[in-house]
Image: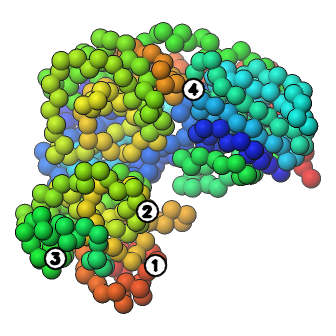
Amino acid sequence: MSLLIVQPGIRSTIQDLGRSGYRRLGVPPGGAFDRGSLMSANALLGNDSAAACLEIALFGGRFEALDPTAIALAGAPFQARIERDGVVIKELRVPCAASLAQGDRVWIGGTPWGCRCYLAVAGGFQTTLVLGSRSSERSIVAGEILPARSSFTISKHMRNPQLCVSPHEPIRIVDGPESDYRARSYLNRLCEIEWVAALDSDRVGVRLDGEVGGIDWVDDSDRPSAPVAPGAIQWTKAGPIVLGVAAGTMGGYPHIAHVITADFDRIGRLAPGNRVRFQRIELSEARRIDAEERRERLAQLKRVAATHENAHYDFK
Amino acid sequence: MEKSKQLDIVPLGDRAFLIRFKDEERARSWYFAARIRSFAGVDDFVLAYRSAAVYFNPDRVDPDELVIDLESIEPRAVEKQPAATIVLPVLYDGADLADVAERLGLSMEDVINEHTSRNYHVFAIGFQPGFPYGGYLSERLTGVPRLESPRSRAPAGSVAIAGRQTGVYPSDSPGGWRILGRTPLRIVDFEREIFPIQAGDSLRFRSIDRDEFLRREGTLLDPNIDT
């Protein structure tokens, strides 16, 4: 009762909404780097919004249903299709839900824009829970079997919520805890120019390439590390890094700014080579947007769940 | 932006606060005081050196009210909070021991004696799950820089130093600190969610021989026994 990994893709990992309450033990929250898309994939199947999905980055792979399985895809518009006996029987358009018969394979290719998509199964993948979450940084490998329940669903599509946000909109940030003269000049530079997501970006951090400018870099590696959180923008000699969901719980570089929660999923949607700008806003504004965003997301997930019939389980 | 008179509280994004202190001791007292109180909507407190962070869920708590609550914490009341002292057995046969001794102008024996001669504060747990940052080293042991290029695998249990700090690798990982030895004990049990060493604890090392190492290899550190 599960999904066999035929081709694993580049960096596919099992993710849910991560773990909270373990930071003091050095355990990062982890979880989906694009939480909104993970929740959409789950909503398409009527899953709990925190159910574990396969997070696919940059390139998908090929997965075989060992049992009838209801799947959903949400996130960046990756190419996707269902194959039966080596023949394509259905093209999928993300976000969508569909049913795989036993032996069917879903193939997921690349994406014209964005970076990640989520493959959900009805009920979520039943991989091992560690510290309250199934989130793992280990990439899946060919031959591995991801446990899932046998299920089916009616095919459905939804409008991609990612289309509502223009990638040209700047990502909004609030000031970080560092506020000395040097941190301010880094922050000004951060907001001044367009940055490019670097090739070596991953779930730990998105590195940004750009003209760092004539700001003196002072190496004070003796300064004690301080707690950080995903979304922290640290300034290093090589330029800024936006910490991702898998970043360590502490950091030593100057923490000059922080991506607002409402825009953080957009960091997870940056593929290497994508351009990005930043815009400073006040903390009170960030909180207002955060509250609004949480309300909207809840309403949207309810709509998706209400307008579609949920997945059905085939209990044997 | 919140700026408190009593506490140096600054926002860490829109769902956390960072509180900064004059020194490690003040940070630790405040952290202990905060941990024993319960705060609705607070997901986590993290201590690291001279600062502590509070992570909250805005669905459950109003950030401005949380600041008022955080300011009401009285660190003095628990300054005497007894922290656990954990004594970690170490077989000092590390790959970098000879090199460290040479760099410091000490004999290997001196390095071992110095390293085992004091209690270290666990200033933070981080870098990887369960990795204790201990400090500070005695002056004689201080000043060995990190490896220029980190080794790709520091084995689980490696006890290492860098700068004026000492730490223990809970699991195999890349690492740039200089390895003095290894403990036979596992210092974290992920599956059973046991993390015997916590930020704020006190850590000491004890030199052991190969027999004791072999006898205890693979056992989980038990703060009730290893004190």
Kindly identify the amino acid type of the residue bearing the numbered disc 3: Met
Which element carries disc 3, helix, strand or loop?
helix
Q: Is residue A144 left or right of residue A232?
A: right
Residue B219 marker: 1
Residue A166 placement (x, y as % from top left): 54, 9
Residue B119 placement (x, y as % from top left): 19, 70
Name the residue that disc number 4 marks.
A115
Please give the chain letter of the residue carrying mark 4. Answer: A
Residue A243 placement (x, y as % from top left): 40, 34
Distance, label 2 to label 3, CA atoms, is 26 Å
The residue closer to the viewer here, A94 or B49, is A94
Name the residue that disc number 3 marks.
B108
Please give the chain letter of the residue carrying mark 2. Answer: B
For marks 2 and 3, give the one nearer the viewer.
3
Residue A111 placement (x, y as % from top left): 64, 22
Establish if B81 lies above or below A2. Answer: below
Are labels 1 and 3 assigned to the same chain? yes
Kindly identify the amino acid type of the residue bearing the numbered disc 2: Ser
User: In terms of sequence position, does the residue under pointer 2 or pointer 3 come before the other?
Assistant: 3
Q: Residue at x 37, y 13 (%)?
A: A194
Distance, label 2 to label 4, CA atoms, is 31 Å
Name the residue that disc number 2 marks.
B171
Are labels 2 and 3 assigned to the same chain? yes
